Image (cartoon, grey):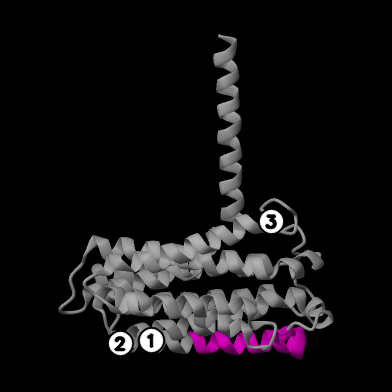
């Protein structure tokens, strides 16, 4: 009986350790931040399925989810890997998993390789469509390249947004195996939206980036000017959404979503002031998560119900 109890305790300890490690990896790649690009990819797929000549396939839906998760996981893990020394020196990021010793460098390298291989391999789900397989490696390399961008350009924020803007284009290709204007407009929305809020987020590290000679718009132009650039980027976001509404032939439900998104973006800029950056995390995650899911839900209602 004592041996059985001891075995049970050992098994519980192993399970607890595995769960803890899984939690660390999910935190490492900021899995919750998948909400920024995934809803736009799904909206692109929904519009594609609604187009004449399209056929809904569950395997395409599953493939989009798998590709989104694995590609983003590979890119985020690579980002944490190459930035580990920078993160260790920055008081704001010193407690991240690699600098804090919660996850080993070897484990993150293995995870990055595993997710990269899984992303490329998962494109076979879309067969007999061949474009996803052809584009998989170039797309992955572009995603990974973002992590090195701030070492040589202040436009690194827009490299990130360019990486994320590929999600609606890729989802459309997965469904229809072609390039088109509608997903390109959705991509434009993401480009200016994500670029804008990444500039806001980078304001926290403006002084640190200057000291370390890292490139960012806040480090180069100052926080006040950076917030103005982010505001302009978000004005263009709204213009792109209105253009999408017009070109895609969407209805008043989606238009209501565009108006609501404009209000939320104004609220985001009201939250963050040049002399008060304490509410950046609220603006960064909470507001933008509402925006992305709100656009998806209202877009689907517009297409399916009205």
Q: Main secondary structure of the magenta part?
A: helix
> Which residue does the numbered mark 1 point to in the structure image?
184
User: Quarter of the image holding residue 18?
Assistant: top right
- Residue 140 position, x and y percent, is 47, 75
Q: Quadrant of the C terminus?
A: bottom left
Q: Give the mark, 1 or 3, whose residue is nearer the N terminus.
A: 3
Can residue 214 be seen in this snapshot? yes
Question: Does residue 38 appear to the left or right of 302 in the view shown?
Answer: right
Q: Give the mark, 3 or 2, whose residue is nearer the N terminus.
A: 3
**Residue 64 vs residue 241, the one in the foreground:** 64
As displayed, is residue 256 above or below residue 179?
above
Residue plotted at (52% across, 76% down)? 143
> Which residue does the numbered mark 3 point to in the structure image?
97
Question: Does residue 115 appear to the left or right of 233 in the view shown?
Answer: left
Residue plotted at (51% across, 89% down)? 236
Task: Answer few, some or many: residues within 10 Å of disc 1's Cα (few below 14, many 20 plus, some between 14 and 19).
Answer: some
Q: Indicate the secondary structure of the residue bearing disc 3.
A: loop
**Residue 51 vs residue 161, the one in the foreground:** 161
Q: Is residue 78 magenta?
A: no
> Which residue does the numbered mark 2 point to in the structure image?
180
Q: Which residues are magenta?
A: 215-237
As displayed, is residue 103 above or below residue 244?
above
- Residue 92 position, x and y percent, is 77, 65
**Residue reaching furthest to the left:** 53
Task: Answer few, some or many: residues within 10 Å of disc 2's Cα (few below 14, many 20 plus, some between 14 and 19).
Answer: few
Report how far apart the C-alphas of labels 2 and 1 lie in the structure.
Answer: 7 Å
- Residue 134 position, x and y percent, is 34, 79
Q: Is residue 217 magenta?
A: yes
Q: Are marks 2 and 1 in contact (CB under 8 Å)?
A: yes
Can residue 172 be seen in this snapshot? no
Residue plotted at (55% across, 74% down)? 264
Q: Indicate the secondary structure of the residue bearing disc 2.
A: loop
């Amino acid at each position: 009986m004592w041996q059985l109890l001891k075995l049970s305790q050992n098994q519980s300890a192993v399970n607890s350790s595995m769960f803890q490690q899984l939690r660390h990896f999910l935190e490492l790649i900021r899995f919750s931040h998948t909400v920024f690009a995934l809803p736009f990819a799904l909206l692109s797929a929904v519009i594609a399925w609604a187009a004449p000549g399209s056929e809904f396939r569950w395997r395409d839906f599953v493939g989009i989810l798998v590709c989104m998760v694995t590609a983003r996981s590979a890119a985020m893990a690579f980002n944490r890997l190459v930035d580990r020394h920078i993160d260790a020196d920055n008081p704001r990021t010193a407690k991240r998993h690699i600098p804090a010793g919660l996850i080993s460098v070897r484990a993150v390298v293995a995870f990055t390789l595993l997710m990269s291989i899984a992303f490329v391999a998962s494109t076979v789900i879309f067969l007999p469509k061949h474009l996803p397989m052809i584009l998989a490696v170039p797309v992955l390399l572009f995603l990974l390249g973002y992590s090195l961008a701030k070492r040589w350009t202040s436009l690194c924020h827009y490299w990130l947004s360019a990486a994320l803007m590929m999600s609606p284009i890729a989802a459309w290709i997965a469904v229809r195996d072609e390039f088109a204007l509608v997903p390109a407009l959705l991509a434009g929305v993401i480009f200016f939206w994500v670029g804008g809020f990444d500039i806001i987020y980078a304001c926290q590290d403006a002084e640190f980036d200057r000291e370390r000679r890292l490139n960012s718009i806040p480090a180069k132009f100052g926080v006040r000017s950076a917030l103005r650039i982010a505001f302009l980027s978000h004005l263009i976001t709204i213009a792109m959404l209105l253009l999408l509404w017009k070109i895609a032939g969407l209805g008043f439900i989606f238009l209501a979503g565009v108006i609501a998104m404009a209000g939320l973006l104004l609220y985001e800029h009201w939250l963050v002031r040049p002399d008060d950056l304490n509410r950046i995390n609220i603006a960064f995650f909470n507001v933008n998560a509402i925006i992305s899911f709100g656009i998806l839900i209202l877009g689907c209602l517009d297409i399916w119900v009205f």
